[in-house]
Amino acid sequence: MRVFIVYCHPSEDSFTKNIRDAFIKGITDSGNEYVISDLYKMDFNADMSEQEYLRDANYRNTPDVAADVLAEHEKINSSDAIAFIYPVFWTEAPAKLVGWFDRVWSYGFAYGDKKMKMMEKAMILCSAGNPIERLEQFGLLASMKKVMFGDRLFNRAKQMEFVVFDGTSREKETREGNWEQNTKKAYEKGKNFFADAEESFSVDDRFFTAVENSASGEVSEQTVFCYHQKGNVIWAEYSGGDIVKGFLIGTMDEEHNLHFNYQHMNTDGNLRTGSCDSAPKIENGKLRFNEKWKWTMGEEGTSVIEEI
């Protein structure tokens, strides 16, 4: 199996460089292969040209794609999975990596009549100066994951994982104190990359929509759920159709069943609340949850949500 690594850091004198090397060693020690694009070392052109903009903006699936972009397309389609390794700059990837997406995610390859293969797995490995608690408390981690998973990698990988190596700023004592622990973590992520892809189950940053519902239910195929998971705790935001905004929170048990309470405001301005038990099933290659729900007022029903 082969992993395509997109690495983006302006300096070899960095913690991120050590994460990269440990991850690569894990990949090779597990008997797998990798190919890498070191965006700074190869001086990748991150600026979209006017010609590229007009081609994509007008949805022209024409053959006039730049040679450096075609080279990246080849690396993607000759690999089984993809990994991005970079430092967090102001809650975002470095500009050169953002530009890589601007140009490489071209029309006719990553969207439209796309030729990009479905990756078995996509993994983000990023170093962050802030501690993970701060990134979560202020919604910064959620923002990073939303951009990477909800947009850039959406429907382009079967499984996605976001790994943060936090407290890595040079001014923080945790940088040196956690150095060995973090490089070991990166090594293990590489070594178990494909094993984890086969064995792990999570709803984190996965999107669903309702494909079936009882008449008294209010969600529909226009309603989109964005799920999150931390340990056995799950939560989601949902909106669309008759739902202005909704939230749910609960747990996942050992059989991956979900148990949660929900509340939402509908388009009539009514606040509705209830509880739900949800059982997973793979159908036609997609993850579904068969749900049994009950409004707080007592009426019961069933629904099915399917991964988008």
Image (cartoon, grey):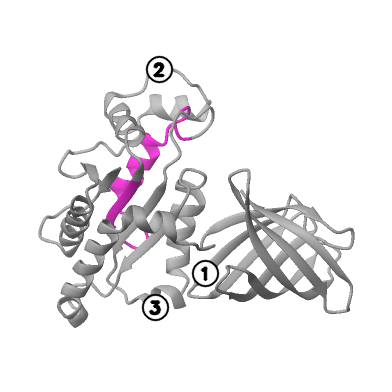
Name the residue located 48 percent from the left edge and 73 percent from the top edge.
230
Does the rendering let one see residue 87? no
Q: How far apart in space, not on screen, are marks 2 and 3 (Cα)?
A: 46 Å
Measuring from the top left, give residue 197's x and y in whole percent: 40, 54
Q: Picture coordinates of residue 228 (x, y %)?
A: 54, 66
Disc ID at residue 229:
1
> Up-down: is 253 above or below 7?
below
Q: In screen coordinates, is 237 left or right of 55?
A: right
Q: Residue furthest top?
A: 63
Front-most of residues 298 and 146: 298
Look at the image and give the residue range highlighted in magenta.
Answer: 82-110
CB atoms at circles 1 and 2 under 8 Å apart?
Answer: no
Q: Give percent across and percent down for residue 104.
A: 37, 35
Q: Nearer the viewer, mark 3 or mark 1?
A: 1
Among numbered discs 3 and 1, the one appearing first in the sequence: 3
Please tell me whether residue 197 belongs to the stretch shown in magenta. no
Residue on which the image places disc 3: 134
Q: Secondary structure at mark 3?
A: helix
Residue 265 relative to residue 238: left or right: right
SS for callout 1 = strand
